[in-house]
Amino acid sequence: MQHFMTMRVVTGRALRAHAHPGAGRTAGSFALAWGLLWLTTGAAAQAPTDPSDTEGFRTACNAGNMSACFRLGEAYEQGIGVEKSPRRAANLFRIGCEEEHARACHRLGTMTRDGSLGEPNREGAIELFKQACKHGNGDGCYEIGSLYDRGDGVTQNAEAARRLYERGCELGSLGGCEGLAGLYMTGRGVGRNPWRAKDFYKRACRGGRDSACAGLAELAEKGRMKLAAKEIEALYTRACKAGNNRACGNIALSSKASTPPEARATYLERGCDGGHATACKELGLLYEDGQGVERDPARAAGLYKRACEGGEPLGCNNLGGLYQDGVGVEPNLQIAVKLYDRACADQSLVGCVNLAAMHASGQGTPRDPVQAFELYEYACEAGQQLACTHLAIAVAQGEGTEKNPSKAAVLLEKGCKQGDQLACAHLGRLVEFGRGIRADLNRARSLYQRSCDGGIAPGCTYLGYLHERGVGAISDTVLAKSLYKRACQARSLEGCVYEAYLTRKDEKLELARKRDSRLFEKACGFGMERGCAGLGYAYESGFGHVEKDLGKALTTYSRACENGDPGGCQALAAMYDEGRGVTSNPAYSQTLRRRACTLGAASACR
């Protein structure tokens, strides 16, 4: 215990010192602050009942009534009936603590911890709280318990925290009851028991400890007790006003639809500051999108990082997305893969889908279609519809598994009926070409339109392709280009490539063509057939950032044609017709044109 110089200071005069509180004390030896012996030989004088009767408290205190000394200390601490003086208050609390007045020890500990008399003194406060607990003050037990619970200044010890919280609660400390409830909620130091947690939260909340009301609200949201939505929000609001920042975050999360973005941001800020990882993630979304706050992707990245480190897997996933796209942070695909992997390992199915996509494309990690397929399958079986759609695409293309368009069609049909517009787009692709399902251009167009209207980039791209070719839809390159542009604006590389493909012959767009040639190169690297066709044209013509190279043009056109792009087949046919970069072969040229016709190029069918 910290040693204190005992100051019998009602008048500010030091009378004696002990080696430690209580040492050398004998019955009837309490000295008056005025230097007089006790005037009473029996029980200490009674304290007055009027809180403003400071003189009465002074008289009773001098007569040895420690409760009166404590009340007088409160008067000096708060400035009630006397001039406010934290130092005099502390001296009076010190007198009481040395005489084993538990509340005085606790109040002096609080002042010592908070630095009311100078620099905060954590070690001194801990010793005073221990004395308060020892002498029967529940709040002193709670204070020490909370330090053990958090590992704040002492070695973290959930079992010690439990014992101290229990004693504190038994002694009437509402903080002790709340702390004990928290342990039962999480299972730290005790067996996890939400029902016991509910009992202790009730005791604390109903007793007036508003911060504990958040625990009841959380239990209600988890179905452990029945409360209306308004009651839950009211409990969170009480707790938030009492300084429970986690409750502030929960207000924003539980009333997401009804709370304006600006107010949500304020609540989430407080929740995040209180260690609420999900609040950090949600606040990151607001900063990433600019809702209720000024858009700040870098701030979003920092918030996602805090959420991730706090155990929120979607924080890891969202931060991975920023690293993948280079938004708010420097692009780093390897870090993105690690973050998606962490999110997936922590049961974020969206994280698993994103990790699978990285394996499928070879971004930030070696291309591994089998690993991608297994991740899609795992997430799909766990109920993630987007994973089921990607699983179906892999099955349709034979990526990482045996090719089976019929099975893919069944999966996509199911997803589309459930409202997954991406599934509708890819189902339309199978319906357009009759792969695993009956061919029907009208239905394909309808599926593409539905998907595009739902904001899905592939739907816009595929619909644009129908209009560009005039297959199953009115031939309209202007409309096609606008659809490609919508897809591109939705961050679809394919949409950007198709938009670029339509503008590549315009000699006035040299800057655009330089950009387009890089798009084609990137798209072809990802196995996108039309990207290879566009890159082939760049090599054939020598525009953009590449040098003219007929050999490379021939290779990329061949790759595009083999992967099903009619434009690639036609361009390759022209090279064989004219013998440019290859030996002339009219017969093979005709074969290539027939393939282009089959793939939907009407001009190749003439």
Image (cartoon, helix red, strand yellow):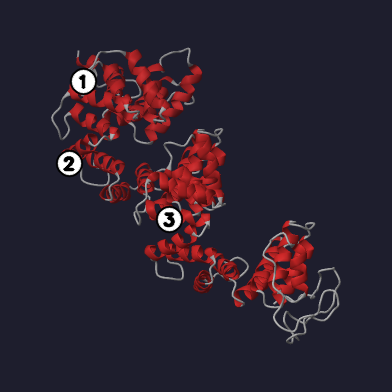
Residue 553 to residue 388: above or below:
above
Q: Which residue is mark 1?
A: 597
Q: Is residue 81 visible?
A: yes
Question: Could you tell which of marks 1 and 2 lies nearer the N-terminus?
Answer: 2
Q: Say the numbered circle drawn on residue 216.
A: 3
At 44% from the left and 60% from the top, the residue drawn is 202
Nearer the observer, 238 or 38: 38
Label 2 SS? helix
At 52% from the left and 33% from the top, the residue drawn is 292
Nearer the observer, 561 or 116: 116
Label 1 SS? helix
Location of residue 105 (image quadrant): bottom right
Amino acid type at image mark 3: Leu
In this rendering, position of residue 154 left or right of residue 422: right
Q: CA distance from mark 3 to mark 1?
A: 68 Å
At 47% from the left and 43% from the top, the residue drawn is 252
Image coordinates for residue 217, horizontal then vertical, percent: 42, 52
Image coordinates for residue 344, horizontal then vertical, percent: 38, 52
Image coordinates for residue 420, horizontal then vertical, percent: 28, 35
Q: CA distance from mark 3 to mark 2?
A: 48 Å
Residue 2 to residue 80: above or below:
below
Instruction: Give the mark toward the camera: 3 or 2.
Output: 3
Amino acid type at image mark 2: Lys
Q: CA distance from mark 1 to mark 2?
A: 28 Å
Nearer the observer, 354 or 452: 452
Location of residue 329 (image quadrant): top right
